[in-house]
Every structure is written in C-alpha cells, then in structure tokens.
Image (cartoon, grey):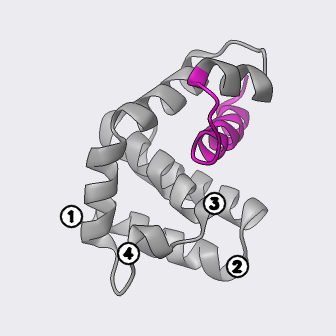
C-alpha cells in the first residue's frame, strides 16, 4: 500500500473511531483488510498519543478550541501531528502537504489553509 493510501485509510479509521463504539481492529478491517505497517503505525500511534497531541494542538490553535473544529479537520490534524512528532522517515513538508491534500479531498479550500497554518507551527518551532 502506498503511503498516501495508508494515510487515507488511517483517516477513515480514526474518524470512525471518534464517532462509534468499534474497536481499533474492527475499524481497521472495516476500512481495508490489507495489512500495512505504516497504516498500522498511523492508526495506533495517533490513538496512543492522542492526549499529548490534543494538548499540543490546543497550544497551537489561535482563537479556536480543538472541540470547535470540524471533525474531519481535527482528525487530519491529529494524524499529521503524530507523524510530525513521532516518526522520522518522512520529511516534515511532505507530511504537511499530505495533510493539506487530505483536507482538500474531505474538507474545503479554507480548511486546507487552516490546516497548513496550524501544522506549519510544528516546523517553525
């Protein structure tokens, strides 16, 4: 599975888990039965570090709270922050670009600018 596809699948799983009673394994199988280390790392890592990620995002958001964000943008931000902060094999600008592309696909144009602005603070810290 390509990384872009893994990110899309992980986004679907994380979004689902945020709004259902499914467990991780069920949600992952519901999205795809294909096994992939990167996909697994994104889902499990984002969930494992969610509290830390949310605290970090709250510090970066200006005039917003995490709970006020649309669900898709919040999920994309969480996943991207996990990847920015806890993985080393992808350049940070690539991670941000991938998050922006996901936001354009599942959100709207203004959302992608917002996501870019928040995530750029992780590079410029």
For mark 2, give the secondary structure. helix
Along the line of sight, the residue nearer the viewer: 32 or 5: 32
Query: Which one is in front in this view, the residue at disc 4 or the one at disc 2?
Result: 4
Q: Earlier in the sequence, mark 1 or mark 2?
A: 2
Q: Identify the residue at image location x=58%, y=24%.
A: 24
Along the line of sight, the residue nearer the viewer: 68 or 106: 68
From the viewer's perspective, tell me whether residue 5 is left or right of residue 43: right
Q: Is residue 81 above or below residue 121?
A: above
| CB atoms of marks 4 and 1 within 8 Å | no
Magenta segment boundaries in residue numbering: 1-24
Q: Earlier in the sequence, mark 1 or mark 3?
A: 3
Residue 61, how many percent across, how many down? 34, 75
Q: CA distance from mark 4 to mark 3?
A: 14 Å
Residue 63, how many percent across, how many down? 35, 87
Looking at the image, how many numbered discs can be counted on the residues?
A: 4
Q: CA distance from mark 1 to mark 2?
A: 25 Å
Query: Which one is in front in this view, the residue at disc 1 or the one at disc 3?
Result: 3
| CB atoms of marks 1 and 2 within 8 Å | no
From the viewer's perspective, tell me whether residue 50 is left or right of residue 9: left
> Which residue is labeled 4 in the image?
65
> Which residue is labeled 3 in the image?
72
For mark 1, give the secondary structure. loop
């Amino acid at each position: 599975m390509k990384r872009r596809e893994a990110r899309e699948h992980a986004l679907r799983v994380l979004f689902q888990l945020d709004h259902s009673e499914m467990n991780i394994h069920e949600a992952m199988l519901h999205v795809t039965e294909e096994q992939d280390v990167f996909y697994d790392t994104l889902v499990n890592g984002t969930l494992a570090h969610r509290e830390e990620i949310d605290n970090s995002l709250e510090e970066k958001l200006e005039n917003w709270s995490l709970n006020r964000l649309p669900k898709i943008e919040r999920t994309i931000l969480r996943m991207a922050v996990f990847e920015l902060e806890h993985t080393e094999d992808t350049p940070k600008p690539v991670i941000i670009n991938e998050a922006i592309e996901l936001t354009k696909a599942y959100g709207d144009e203004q959302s992608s600018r917002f996501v870019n602005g928040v995530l750029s603070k992780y590079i410029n810290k």
